[in-house]
Amino acid sequence: MAAKGSQFLTLADVAKSKNKVIGGVAEVLMNQNAMLEDMMYTEMNEGTIHKEDIRSALPEVYYRKANQAIPSSKSTIEERSFTATHFESKSQVDRAVAERGGMDRVAYNRWNQAQGHLQAHANELADLMIYGSPSTANRKTAGLFDIYSTVDTAAEETANQVIDAGGTGSDNCSILKVHHGERSIFGVYPKGTTAGLTRNDHSKGGKVIKIEALDSNGAAGSLWGYEEEFLTDHGLVVKDYRQAARVCNIDVSNLVSGTGAADLIDLMISANYKIDNVQNGKGVWYVNRTVEAHLHKQALTKVGAGGGLSFENFEGRRILTFLGDPVKRMDALLNSEARIV
């Protein structure tokens, strides 16, 4: 779904408009990563860097009488820069496997082999969106939980968007509410690329190449087959941090046992009212399967449409919703988060 009057499109829409093959890659990624269905994407406005002017304060307004002058005023603007992270993988298929069933099956067999690589890319992108790139990465890029990282409002203003569910230890998880849009939170990719997705086919035209590999004993060897690379360059822009909210410190052991578990529906209501403007962007809830199962059970004890939790038709599918916004499973949300303080 494209944002009206803008160049902000979903990943699949961007990819399909540029390259049919990459459009197929994007569809696989979206099937594996729920957030890619919702996040809007645009090209970086300065090559491999994206700069955004973010309003940090509104202009002053004045009451005046006739013939009385007032001072000029303006909004305060801050410029922030965002980068994309890069990762890749190489798909290699033995000729004997790729050509199984005849030469007319090569394309199908190669694409079947590539599915695992694309799913791995989708999982890595999901992890990047939430937790950011590893601290060991050459270029550290922030994820949503790098921004919504504390409940201490004296330390970070973004803490106003974070709700503490009370869990301790290191077996906690989170619920995330995001409003995707060009004036809130969106994704970026380097200018001139096919939606930040690249497929380099080293065996284009059915060319069989020599592939260096290790044998079963770990010794260097080679085989003949087909090879292609998949590359991803994506970044995250949080233009308005007030358009997302996090419920953190949800004790997983209590959810599983059903004893002493936090009232997730109550916490999600609180999170919903942390959103500054529910009309700004497309609102979506993200939970892992542990939370999803508990929500289903908890809804049974609530009155009136499950306390706001219900199943509705959303974009042609039957999906769990809460307060009118879809609840989607995203297992990149870990059950092993340390307590957020």
Image (spheres, rainbow, N blue to C red):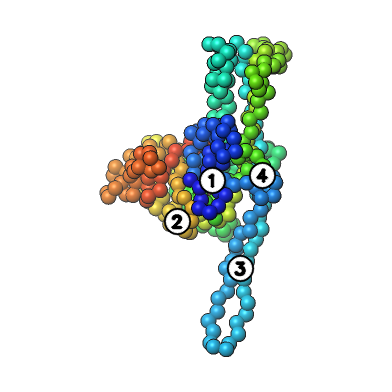
Q: Earlier in the sequence, mark 1 or mark 3?
A: 1
Question: Residue, x 59% and y 47% (percent of image)?
Answer: 42
Q: Residue 170 location, x and y as percent? A: 52, 39
Q: Earlier in the sequence, mark 4 or mark 1?
A: 1
Q: Secondary structure at mark 2?
A: loop
Label 4 is placed on what type of residue? Lys
Residue 69 image-quadrant placement? bottom right
Q: Secondary structure at mark 3?
A: loop
Spatial separation of the CA atoms under disc 4 and disc 3: 29 Å
Label 3 is placed on what type of residue? Ser
Question: Residue, x 69% and y 45% (percent of image)?
Answer: 48
State the residue position of label 2. Answer: 278
State the residue position of label 1. Answer: 9
Q: Secondary structure at mark 4?
A: loop
Q: Residue 234 location, x and y as percent? A: 62, 41
Spatial separation of the CA atoms under disc 4 and disc 2: 30 Å
State the residue position of label 4. Answer: 191
Label 1 is placed on what type of residue? Leu
Tell me if mark 2 has few (under 14), some (14-19) or many (20+) residues whose alpha carbon lies within 10 angstroms of its own: some
Residue 156 image-quadrant placement? bottom right
Location of residue 201 with respect to 134 vertically, above or below: above
Location of residue 61 with respect to 42 vertically, above or below: below
Spatial separation of the CA atoms under disc 1 and disc 3: 29 Å
Question: Residue, x 44% and y 38% (percent of image)?
Answer: 329
Question: Residue, x 54% and y 16% (percent of image)?
Answer: 105
Spatial separation of the CA atoms under disc 2 and disc 3: 23 Å
State the residue position of label 3. Answer: 75
